[in-house]
Image: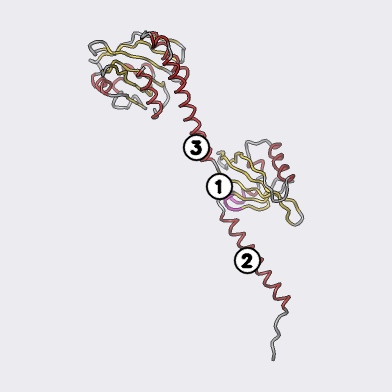
Amino acid sequence: MIRQMPPKRKLASVQQQRALREHQALEEIMFSQSVDGILLLDPLTQRFISFNPAAHQQLGYTREEFAALTVTDLQGEDPPDIVKANIDAALAGEPGKPIQFETTHRCKNGELRNTLVILTPLTYGGRPLICDVWRDITAQKKAEREQRAVTDKLQLFSRLFSQISAMESALEGDIPAFSREVTELLGRSMQITRVSVWLYSDDDQVLECVDVFDLRFGEHSTGMTVTVELFRKEFDYLKHARYVDANDALTDYRTQGYGEVYLKPLGISSMLNCSIVSGGRNRGLIRFAYLKEPHTWDHDEIAFGCQVADQ
């Protein structure tokens, strides 16, 4: 019996169907394994027709929980009119031409994540849909904010140092007046609760406060003294250090001895002492202090404090 070969047209159709299935399987693999959130959106109902695992897993939802949401639920901080405006803008664009914007997505636990969203209009089965792809850029936005904060702080330090260098009291060598101007300028500009200037007595046995500015009350005071006899260990650190950065002044071995007499009564929690050095001798210090709040003194703050002390 002779077996007939299938017609060439039918064979080609089978091959095309196999190729189509393979292509669809490949797309499904790419869709499911993408680290970006991807979903197909019905622009009329704002509901999700299909989405990949990353879409719901990144935000802490189960697949069933995520399927019950809308775009407005997802973009928790954007009002409904903004969400609709973005969808309308995507639909009004050319097919295959996306629009792009930044927003936030709300996780199941309430946390907000920064996201870069790309909306692309498409037609499937004669029906207008939108492909919504987003990428979590929370870490990137945090790094940008931190860099801006560093830049702003360095610009502030530069401006303050220029102001301090130009003070007439500094040029005239009027230490009390200069101290008063500097402590208030730094306290208000840097929002530091207490800024003070202290000088050693001629025999180095007493440290006397020339001026302290208290930001809470906007007031100056002077005359406070600390003797070597009471705090010999702490004075040894001060006399031989360029600075003492006590993030937690009550537990730092260089400052904890001041606790009962000085730190606790004033409520000082964090303190930076920058030594005033002249003629090779430690003449005193400028002190920056926060009250009842933690603070970690970073390199830029320490360097600036030492620059001011040099003035």
Q: Amino acid at mark 1?
A: Gln
Q: CA distance from mark 1 to mark 3?
A: 20 Å
Q: Nearer the viewer, residue 35 or 107?
A: 35
User: Residue 231, located in which quarter of the rendered image?
Assistant: top left
Q: Which mark is residue 22?
A: 2
Q: CA distance from mark 3 to mark 2?
A: 42 Å
Q: Which residue is located at x 63 percent, y 38 percent?
A: 76
Provide residue 282's location: percent of width, then percent of height.
27, 18
Q: Which residue is located at x 29 percent, y 27 percent?
A: 253
Q: Amino acid at mark 2?
A: Glu
Vertical order, 277 against 145 (above or below) = above
Q: Which quadrant would the N terminus be assigned to in this image?
A: bottom right
Q: CA distance from mark 1 to mark 2?
A: 28 Å
Residue at disc 3, secondary structure: helix
Magenta run includes residue 54: yes
Mark 1, residue position: 58
- Mark 1 or mark 3: whose residue is earlier in sequence: 1
The magenta segment? 52-65
Magenta run includes residue 227: no
- Mark 1 or mark 2: whose residue is earlier in sequence: 2
Mark 3, residue position: 143
Dot 1 surroundings within 10 Å: few (below 14), some, or many (20 or more)?
A: some
